Amino acid sequence: LAAALRKIVAEDPFFELVRPILACTTVHPGHHTDVVVDMSMHKKAFEPPESGRAVRVLLYCTNLQDDKWGKHHWPAASDLLVNHRPVELVQQCRDGRNRNKALLERPADVLGLLMPHSGNNLRFAAVPCAVTSEWVFGLYLVEERTTKEMLQVVRKRPLERCIAGIKEIFGDGEVVFSDMTVKLRDPISFARIRIPAKGANCNHVQSFDAEGYFDFQRKAKNAKWQCFVCQRPVPAEKLEIDSWFVNVLEATANQPEVDEVEYFADGTWKAKLEDDSPSSSGAQTPVPEPSRPVRPAEDELVVEAPPLKRRRSLPEATFSRPPIPPSADYVDLLSDDES
């Protein structure tokens, strides 16, 4: 059991195992769900290593009969106390009922709670109904690998293989692709890609930033070691730097306005600007000047346009005073005659 748990620690890409502090402790199903361990820490465990890396004391846990065997994970509704101080655990089923499968469970760092040259009390508890099989946990002293160190061991995909992958996407030419483009910005951070990478089994041309990928897996709660483009599994040892994409970024380093390029079946490419239309050939088309009226020469024949036809106007309406019948009596108010 100790060797199996130590293998989990050794395969953690972010840490390098120094030595075990508490090699293995077993939690049995149905009972002993509250485990108390008293131990003492040597002062050397708190001294910075010669490598200059950060030191951690991590508590790892796993299930012996679970489908997640070989990976770190916690029992449901687990609690951890170090020297009577609670430690927040990153676990999928915190309340013992609802499980957040998108959350990546991580080991607990307890270095800040331990005391040198004195007794340390570690108490691990879980709900009895959640412990249906044997669990093991151990405490290990590790050194944290930096992202720069992790990038130094990433393999580089040869340019010939990158171009061959592009040709495979286009096929035998029977299918015509109108617009095949890749973006020069990372799909997660939206910053310009510095170190283009993808998984060894990824077939797409689009890359993501390798440094941002490692930082995301180190800090994000929903980290899954999956490709940002196709969601295929990409563990640290399967990450590759794309040589073709490196050439594109180097050629457009002085063109910050270029965020996207179009690539072709032979591996060539061209910058794609925002004002480019889909049918554009890539060259900037000059904008024609507005036309101006030209005065014809005297000896040139000038053809006059026929006169426009006017609409027929309606006759003007005439208004006349209606005649007064002769038998009608009326009074002229303007007359001076009183009769």
Image: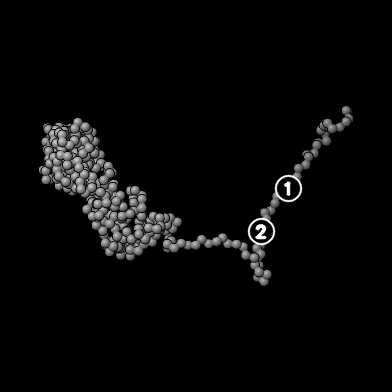
Q: Residue 261 lies in what quarter of the image?
A: bottom left
**Residue drawn 15% across the image and 33% down it:** 119
**Residue drawn 19% across the image and 41% down it:** 46
Establish if 100 lies above or below 229. Answer: above
Is residue 201 or residue 10 the one in the foreground? 10
Is residue 147 or residue 299 the one in the foreground? 147
Q: Residue 32 lies in what quarter of the image?
A: top left
Residue 139 rendering spot, x and y as whole percentages: 16, 40
Residue 66 rendering spot, x and y as whole percentages: 15, 42
Report whether 166 appears left or right of 7: right
> Looking at the picture, which amino acid does disc 2 mark?
Leu
Report whether 142 appears left or right of 246: left
Q: Residues within 10 Å of mark 2 (few under 14, many from 20)?
A: few
The residue most toward the top is 338
Q: Mark 1 vs mark 2: which is more N-terminal?
A: 2
**Residue drawn 30% across the image and 49% down it:** 212
Residue 80 rendering spot, x and y as whole percentages: 19, 34
Residue 318 rendering spot, x and y as whole percentages: 75, 45
Q: Residue 301 lies in what quarter of the image?
A: bottom right
- Which numbered mark, 1 or 2, is in the foreground of this view? 2
Q: Judging from the image, what secondary structure is the residue with disc 2 in?
A: loop
Look at mark 1 in the image and give the residue it sits on: 316
Look at mark 2 in the image and give the residue it sits on: 308
Q: Residues within 10 Å of mark 1 (few under 14, many from 20)?
A: few
Quadrant location of the C terminus in the rendered image: top right
Q: Judging from the image, what secondary structure is the residue with disc 1 in?
A: loop
